[in-house]
Amino acid sequence: MINSKVLYLGLILMSSLLLPACGGDSNSSNKPDTVEQGSEEPTTEEPAPEPDTQAPTISQVFPNNNHGMHSKQVLVSGQAKDDNALTSVVIIYGDESIIAELNGHIFSAIINAKPGKNNYSILATDEANNVTTVNENFYFGARASAGGAHSGVIMNDKIYAWGRNNKGQAGIGFITSINDDPEISTSHPVIPTLISAPSASDGEEATETKFVSLAFNQNSSTALDSNGNVWSWGDGDNGQLGLGTPDDDIIDETDHTSPQKIQALSNIIAISRGNDHCLLLKADGTVLAFGDNGQGQLGDGTNDDKDAPVAVNGLTNIVQISASIGSYAIDEDGRLWAWGSNKYGQLANGVKDRETHNVPVQIAIDEPVVNIASGKGHALALTRSGKIYAWGLNASSQVGMRTSETWESYILAPKLLPWFDDVIAIWAKGNQSFAQRSDGKIYPWGQNMLGTLGIEQDGDVEQPGSPIFGLENVADLGNGALHTLAIRNDGEAFAWGWSYEGSLGGGKSTIHRWAYRLPLLLSIYK
């Protein structure tokens, strides 16, 4: 029999052991529960990330704002940024979608342009599928061109011309001079004058001829229309108007006072006129030429003048042409070709000579060339990196630094010019050179005896230091032997340099035989 006292003490002992486990302690309600070993700590949920709604930014696009381009192959570039990460940049050009190459924030892509105005769009997309679109445009062709003392511009698909007209090069239908009898000289074109051309036949309807590019030099003129046809007028010496009959053994040297269409010629996308010859670029990348061939400048393997277009030997996939005394072309790989005169070292092959060079040879430059501009005896080449190489005649520092650093009067191989690495366009003619930098301003150098460079400085300019005075946002330039034209992005036209036979287009108030160093605003009734 169990002792009752022992049983009572045992019950008390068991109660003392069970109470803590059952939470019987009076202070246990204020203490956190004990976490058993191996159990998880309580967690707090992170808030959901904010959705990415910020679209990429696009800036520093070129070409833009209807800027003039002289090569069929146009490099579109700019900067695209996003707060997170870009997925792609795509260029929309007509029916094409071109995926741009990305190098950090810089994008680039190549467009094969059509003559005239070209529209394109840039689409930048980020990882959240936010899209930014920028619409831009540029112009393929020369809207301004100047010869020895005559000038022309294209406005709204029409040609306006003025200046010297002793060979009919102004295109007004008859020959005039500023020094004629006053009753006759009133018809001389001292202001921009609308030039008419026969309308094109489209079935039974006649449509107005629309022009997209000009090429003037010395006393001859050439124009390209939107249908790929070529028109010529002015001095016909050496068959340089291209209006003769092929293979008839007679060189047509007839002068013409109004635009004449070159027959049996089509699909031309670019034109360039030298001293007495002309180059034509076809849509298939081949090149034609006609005119004086005494130095082999037609590139057909002969030295015979041609009054109808003939093929230049061995050139394919060409994207730009340029003619002066000699001839130049760039292919789609950025290789530069030259032929014709080497009197001043224009072939950049280390020598100068008076031999004929009647087939194209390559000029060695270390990086791809995107533009070529040729003057009387010198040339400029713009590379993809924004640098300029130059060579040829340097008597007036048109290559550069003739006096202070005593660069030679003939530069016989491509010379890297040390001044700029942000050039976007180049021009050359006569003994002058012009470069447009990324700031949109034009920087000239070379011969300046008659105000041809458009700056206040007198005398030849050894290096480009000052931009053309008061002229910004230039879309295209057209320089002649002693005067220069410019078209601004807003469509206004300017002229400066030697005023002769109305070459500047300033009207009767412009002094004949006078140098105008600063640009004159032209009145064109568009």
Image: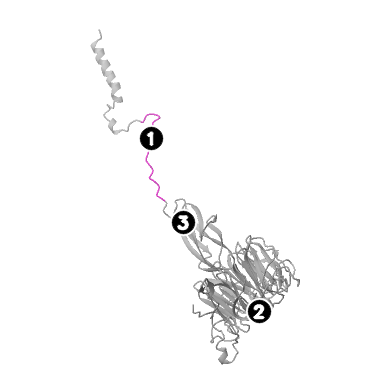
The kind of residue tagged 3 is Pro
Residue pointed to by mark 2: 236
- Magenta stretch containing residue 203, yes or no? no
Q: CA distance from mark 3 to mark 1?
A: 42 Å
- Magenta region: 35-51
Look at the image and name its color scheme.
one colour
Report whether residue 401 is seen.
Answer: no
Q: Secondary structure at mark 2?
A: loop
Q: CA distance from mark 1 to mark 2?
A: 97 Å
Q: CA distance from mark 2 to mark 3?
A: 56 Å
Q: Secondary structure at mark 1?
A: loop
Residue pointed to by mark 1: 41
The percent coordinates of residue 334 (x first, y second) are 64, 61
Disc 3 crowd rating (10 Å Cα; few below 14, some 14-19, many 20+) is many
Along the line of sight, which residue is nearer the eye, 501 or 466? 501
Residue 472 left/right relative to 39? right
Along the line of sight, which residue is nearer the eye, 157 or 522? 157
The percent coordinates of residue 14 (x first, y second) are 28, 19
Along the line of sight, which residue is nearer the eye, 498 or 354? 354
- Magenta stretch containing residue 47, yes or no? yes
Disc 1 crowd rating (10 Å Cα; few below 14, some 14-19, many 20+) is few
Name the quadrant containing residue 344. Answer: bottom right
Which mark is first along the chain, 1 or 3?
1
Q: Residue furthest left?
A: 4
Residue 402 left/right relative to 438? right
